[in-house]
Amino acid sequence: MTGEATTYPVSVKGVVIHDGRVLLLHNERDEWELPGGRIEPGESPEECVVREIAEETRLLVRANELLDAWTYHIDAVGRSVFIVTYGCTLVEDGAPVVSPEHDAAELFSPTDVATLRMPDGYKRSITTWFEMNAR
């Protein structure tokens, strides 16, 4: 194999369902996304998603099942990110507080999610977590 190895930053995202709706954040690329972010050295993916959701929304969650993983190419910035998603459970009720990283936080029904501008991988993870919680 020739050429340089390609590496990607890792972003761990959480699917948080509250009252039958999923929490999504609106970013500067005019997309909706799951809360979460980059994993730090020495941190487990589960620790990362719990920390990132608290930083971005001030909500306390528990990371549960690993839902999916894929590489997402962000055209607007010309780079790719390795995305890992977890189903998360709220530890205590509360309204999300939007961090400076986003301009809005909203709860959406599963049918609303299908119409939103967001990566298909997020939609797949949201559908999976809703199905797992319906059992």
Image (cartoon, rainbow, N blue to C red):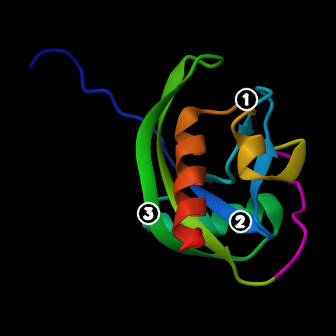
Q: Kindly identify which residue carries mark 3.
A: 66
For the residues labelled 2 and 3, the Cα–Cα distance comes to: 15 Å
The three-letter code of the residue at mark 3 reads Leu
Kindly identify which residue carries mark 2.
17
Task: Say what amino acid the circle numbered 1 marks.
Answer: Arg
Q: CA distance from mark 3 to mark 1?
A: 23 Å
What residue do we see at 75% from left, 33% from top? 116
Residue under the point 59% across and 17% down: 75
Up-down relation of residue 135 to residue 116 (above or below): below
Q: Earlier in the sequence, mark 3 or mark 1?
A: 3
* Left or right of residue 3: residue 129: right
What's the CA distance linking mark 2 and mark 1?
Answer: 19 Å
Identify the element where label 2 is drawn: strand
Q: Which residue is mark 1?
A: 117
Percent from the top left, x then y, of residue 58? 82, 69
Could you say which quadrant of the image residue 31 lies in? top right
> Start and end of the magenta stretch?
93-101
Name the residue: 80% across, 70% down.
Answer: 19
Report the mark closest to the observer, 2 or 3. 2
For the residue pair 36 and 24, the one nearer the viewer reads as 24
| Among the two numbered marks 2 and 3 on one chain, the one whose residue lies closer to the N terminus | 2
Residue 97: percent from left, percent from top = 90, 62
Q: Secondary structure at mark 3?
A: strand
